[in-house]
Amino acid sequence: MGSPPRFSPSVSWRRILCIVSLPFISSGFAPRMKIRDNFIFAKAQPEPKGHRYNWSHLTPLELRDRSVGLQTQERAGRNPCFTLEGHEFLIWGGSIHYFRVPREFWRDRLLKLKACGFNTVTTYVPWNLHEPERGKFDFSGNLDLEAFVLLAAEVGLWVILRPGPYICSEIDLGGLPSRLLQDPASQLRTTNHSFVEAVDEYLDHLMARVVPLQALLKRGIVELLLTSDNTNEVLKGHIKGVLATVNMKSLKEDEFKELYKVQSNKPILIMELWVGWFDTWGNKHVVRDAVDVENTVSDLIRLEISFNVYMFHGGTNFGFMNGATYIDHHRGVVTSYDYDALLTEAGDYTPKFFKLRELFKSILVTPLPALPEPTPKAVYPSVRPSLYLPLWEALPYLNSPVVSRPLNMENLPINNGNGQSYGLVLYQTTICSGGRLHTNAQDEAQVFLNETDLGILADGHQDVYIPRITECQLLRILVENQGRVNFSWKIQNQQKGLIGPVTMNNIPLESFTIYSLELKMSFFKRLRSASWKPVPDGHLGHPAFYLGTLKAGSSPTDTFLTLPDWNYGFVFINGRNLGRYWNIGPQKTLYLPGSWLEPEDNEIILFEKIMSGSYIHTTDKPIW
């Protein structure tokens, strides 16, 4: 999750469970013991000097015929503990989200997790990516959840699966499909009938895939279930009979006060130990000191507290998957989900990685695996786009427009009734007079009279002045979804595009031609047949596509794109959406996986919204 506390008073927590998958079986819950003040600090004793852990026999392959799985156990004079097949066990987990990592690198990242000393990988399951349309599921390619879980087992890692349906995770709408916003009466994350019905249909499909991965059962989920809340939110989020876990940054004396009120006879699991944080556009890059992380993990091990590092490897918000925050105003999460984690966005080692590896090495009996070689990086020749196509000339290559009153993105009658989830929407109509244009545009809109830019509509700025005109002109409003808020009660009103009426001098404008700019790969295939124009000298100041060729040589490897004099837009490599760039930072580079490059020539297209730049450069290191 990696996010501030949630403020959703009607949350249906019974449907927001985490499943410990592959190895674990539910143990049942004994009657709650009397709460003991500061139990963990009063009772937990430092391990004897020289104590070392040996879990070499507690691996998925060694225990393929297990019958007991994970349980909890009370111990006289000591804290409760987890047991795995009857053996005392600490969960040392690290989060990797398969959907944020190119599939070709899954094994590399999992091997690095194992080599660091962890025994468990944790991942979310994003509903919005897996069910893009009602009843249409995608578990292929980079979304092949089953392949990821089985690969983890092969590497020797247990899996904690966090299926949602709500996951937060700084992903668009916390992982909920945007089509759920079509009905204004539907209340997300509540017991509202339409929401629960959609959840049930999704979980019916997902669980059919997950159940066989438990490896213990004939049917049904009986693995250890858990909830996850910030330490001060446990009383709101826990469920009777389900293990309560907590999220935190560092260990404090009163950190588990609320947890003890609901659960004092179970081992503690820090479901999210935040070792860094996510970044939002326009703010400074967030980092956390490696020594602080090392000290916190050392304390948790000494106190026999299980934990899951969030994130071990963050990866990338490719395409339009990023979420957003809304505290004082809307801020989109940046394309990089580096998270200042143990591995960088591109999977490279960090000081945090080596500090924790040395810590684990000092207390494990079995030597750690050798470190996988670093993923090679390359610097390629700079690219100067030679051709461009104004947005207005690309419209014929989009899907057929909708003619209607203004509709928000989610309610556009496209994609088999599922609306539009991501990207931009262009609204066009004819006006014959100037004056005050007023509308609610989410998240940001550029207003044009024909091809002349008249201004921006965004939070707090809902008016643009249209100059006096003597004959009818084309009004164009280009609206971008910059990411739906992924936590808090604000998820209920995250519709994007034009929300409500559009008025000119308080008179509604009724009929618009509405183009959906989802910018999918199929669009770029069609765009190849367009009449592109040579890029003139100087800079062009209107939304346009810019085409160039990235020459990657015979054996492409990872690189990072830098766009020093471009302003705001998106980069597409061979039709794949690398994500958003923006000159306000903090992110200054875009990660380009080598596995997405073809030998020699690669098509690179920039959709620049504001003002074109000159060159696209590459570098072998990320820049913040």
Image (cartoon, rainbow, N blue to C red):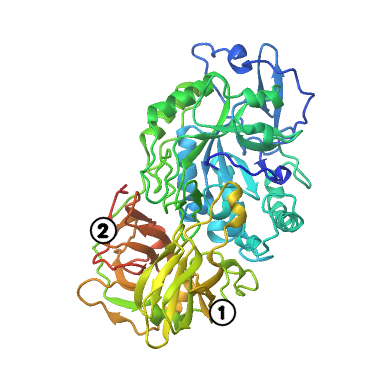
The image shows residue 35 at horizontal and vertical percentages of 71, 18
The image shows residue 79 at horizontal and vertical percentages of 65, 18
| 262 relative to 533, above or below | above
Any mark on residue 564, and which? Answer: 2
Q: Is residue 458 visible?
A: yes
Residue plotted at (41% across, 51% down): 336
Q: Is residue 543 visible?
A: no
Which residue in the protein does label 1 denote? 510
Q: Which type of secondary structure does the marked residue at label 1 adopt?
A: loop
Tell me how far mark 2 sits from mark 1, CA to CA: 41 Å
Amino acid on which the number 1 mark rests in the picture: Glu
- Residue 122 falls in image quadrant: top right
Count of labels in the image:
2
Q: Which type of secondary structure does the marked residue at label 2 adopt?
A: loop
Q: Earlier in the sequence, mark 2 or mark 1?
A: 1
| 236 relative to 168, above or below | above
Residue 551 vs residue 525, the one in the foreground: 525
Residue plotted at (57% across, 39% down): 5
Q: Are marks 2 and 1 in contact (CB under 8 Å)?
A: no
Residue 128 vs residue 595, the one in the foreground: 128
In which quadrant is the N terminus drawn?
A: top right
- The residue at the far bottom in this view is 471
The image shows residue 500 at horizontal and vertical percentages of 57, 68
Q: Is residue 461 left or right of residue 495?
A: left
Residue plotted at (29% across, 77% down): 387
The image shows residue 133 at horizontal and vertical percentages of 64, 66
The crowd level at tag 2 (other Cα within 10 Å; few <14, some 14-19, many 20+) is some
Q: Is residue 598 left or right of residue 403?
A: left
Amino acid on which the number 2 mark rests in the picture: Pro
